[in-house]
Image: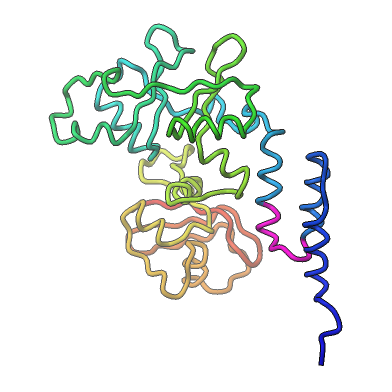
Amino acid sequence: MQEESSPSWTRGLKKWLNAEPETRDELLKLVQNSRKFLEPDTVAMLEGVLDLPATKIREVMTPRTSLISLQENDDLLDIIHVLIESAHSRFPVFSAENNDSVIGVLLAKDLLPFLTERQSQKVDITALMRQPLFVPESARSDQVLRMLKNTQTHIAIVIDEYGTTSGIVTLEDILEEIVGEIEDEHDEADQYAQFIQPDPESELQNAWLVQALTPIEHFNTLLGTHFSDEEVETMGGLLLQEIGLVNDLEGQVIELDGWSFDILEADSRSIQLIRAVRL
């Protein structure tokens, strides 16, 4: 018996392929209307590609105020500290004479030979850094993506109309406009960094403000503890497991394995904020 007709999505695909959009907006509308026979992620990526020419690099860049950078006269110890704290792989290097001018880009891997030497030695950053790629704030994202590809570079310095450094843009920044947020192990570490902070109101050096949603594993790693996460996963869950059900969680103090945990913020069912003090 002969099939009655092609599936509806096949007909839609044929209609979509036969269409001849004359403008970018018409093409974008076709892509948006293709959700019936394309995966949502595929549609989102196509929309990202089509939006690149309309996206100025100033909308994508990391601004100057948020940059982690180096100075050309920095000592090796200072540089290594920045590398470890930031976990970045590329750093803009600013001129010692002009704080608004980037004179090069230093790759962390280029410092590896020096890590086996005495850390007190003087390192000439200018001899190690790479030539920077400069792009204007007004450049289109698709143009900068092409420039990064052609020069085999992963980072560009963004400058304003006066030649002053406005920020930086990376290959990952532009790709995220197409495929969405790209997270790696360093992003996860940054995400958890806000969960545990020194308590500014405490006179004790071993006092920490801890978000209740902090993973036990992260708490153990950061503070050298050995709390079990076999039955519960968060620090709030660990304390609830220890004290059980009480009428008023806020103000409760629990001592565990040489630590004192003071519940600072909580409601009737859950804990939000904890002060942890090493005894």
> Given the current orientation, which residue lies at the most extreme front position?
2
Q: Residue at x 38, y 69 (%)?
A: 228
Residue 116 lies, in percent from the top left, at 15, 36
Residue 251 in the image: above or below residue 198: below
Question: Which contiguous range is marked in magenta?
Answer: 35-44
Q: Which image quadrant: the N terminus?
A: bottom right
Residue 217 lies, in percent from the top left, at 40, 61
Magenta run includes residue 163: no
Which one is in front, 17 or 199? 17
Dominant secondary-structure state across the stretch colored magenta: helix
Q: Is residue 205 left or right of residue 154?
A: left
Which one is in front, 76 or 53? 53
Q: Is residue 47 left or right of residue 195?
A: right
Residue 139 in the image: above or below residue 48: above
Q: Residue at x 37, y 10 (%)?
A: 96
Q: Quadrant of residue 37?
A: bottom right
Q: Residue at x 13, y 29 (%)?
A: 118
Q: Residue at x 58, y 30 (%)?
A: 61
Residue 156 lies, in percent from the top left, at 49, 27
Residue 163 lies, in percent from the top left, at 55, 11
Which one is in front, 77 or 199? 77
Residue 212 in the image: above or below residue 86: below
